[in-house]
Amino acid sequence: GAGVISEKKRIQVHIPAGVDTGTRLRLRGEGEAGTHGAPPGDLYLEVCVAPHPVFTRKHKDLYYRAQVSFVEAALGTEVEVPTLTSSTRLAIPPGTQPGATLRLSGLGLPGLRGKPAGDLVVLVDLQTPTRLSEQQKQLLQEFLRLKDTGELDGLKEMEA
């Protein structure tokens, strides 16, 4: 009696890269039929982004946890870091502390409406070995002995 036929309809929706949970997308003319021959209204979709298995997200920035050993953090190293499209090498500087953050500019999520992309922020997690060989234990004990005697302080002065 209302002059409207209810039907199910499947539509394809383009979700722009970089949208976040809570973003509302308007689909013009895909809503309910208008009354008295008026055009149909709009359909609004609210986006809910699933968590990523590798990255965490904060706005446009992506966060990745890189695992390095305490020796690599002390001496410096390079690690392979995944990105959204491939991977890249990142230099971990000597003396890097646990929890340090390193930024790869522009490797985060794309910006909406022409805005610049976010960053990929790498958080340095220190891995402490749980099983050491006898040689590794001896070397670490020697390192500790040198540290306690102040001999390592002289090495810092020579490097400067």
Image: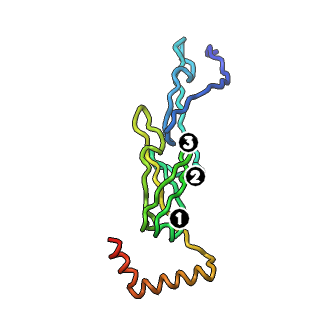
Residue 92 location in percent, x, y? 46, 60
Label 1 – label 3 distance at C-alpha: 23 Å
Q: Earlier in the sequence, mark 1 or mark 3?
A: 1
Tell whether 124 sits left or right of 158.
right
Residue at the image point whose x is 39% and y is 84% from the top: 151
The residue lying furthest to the front in this view is: 158
Residue 68, numbered circle: 1
Residue at the image point whose x is 35% and y is 80% from the top: 154
Q: Given the image, on which type of amino acid does mark 1 rest?
A: Val
Q: Given the image, on which type of amino acid does mark 3 rest?
A: Thr
Q: Can you say whether 37 is above or below 10 in the image?
A: above
Residue 112 location in percent, x, y? 44, 35
Number of numbered discs overlaid on the protein picture:
3
Residue at the image point whose x is 62% and y is 16% from the top: 4
Question: Residue beneath label 2, please?
Answer: 54
Residue 140 location in percent, x, y? 53, 81
Q: Earlier in the sequence, mark 1 or mark 2?
A: 2
Residue at the image point whose x is 41% and y is 32% from the top: 114
Tell whether 65 sits left or right of 112.
right
Query: Which quadrant would residue 131 be assigned to in this image?
Result: bottom right
Q: Can you say whether 108 is above or below 70 in the image?
A: above
Instruction: Answer yes or no: is residue 107 visible.
Output: yes
Q: Can you say whether 4 is above or below 106 in the image?
A: above
Tell whether 113 sits left or right of 55.
left
Question: Residue beneath label 3, please?
Answer: 85
The crowd level at tag 3 (other Cα within 10 Å; few <14, some 14-19, many 20+) is few
Instruction: Answer yes or no: is residue 59 visible.
Output: no
Label 1 – label 2 distance at C-alpha: 16 Å
Helix, strand or loop at mark 1? strand
Helix, strand or loop at mark 3? loop
Q: Can you say whether 40 is above or below 157 in the image?
A: above
The crowd level at tag 2 (other Cα within 10 Å; few <14, some 14-19, many 20+) is few
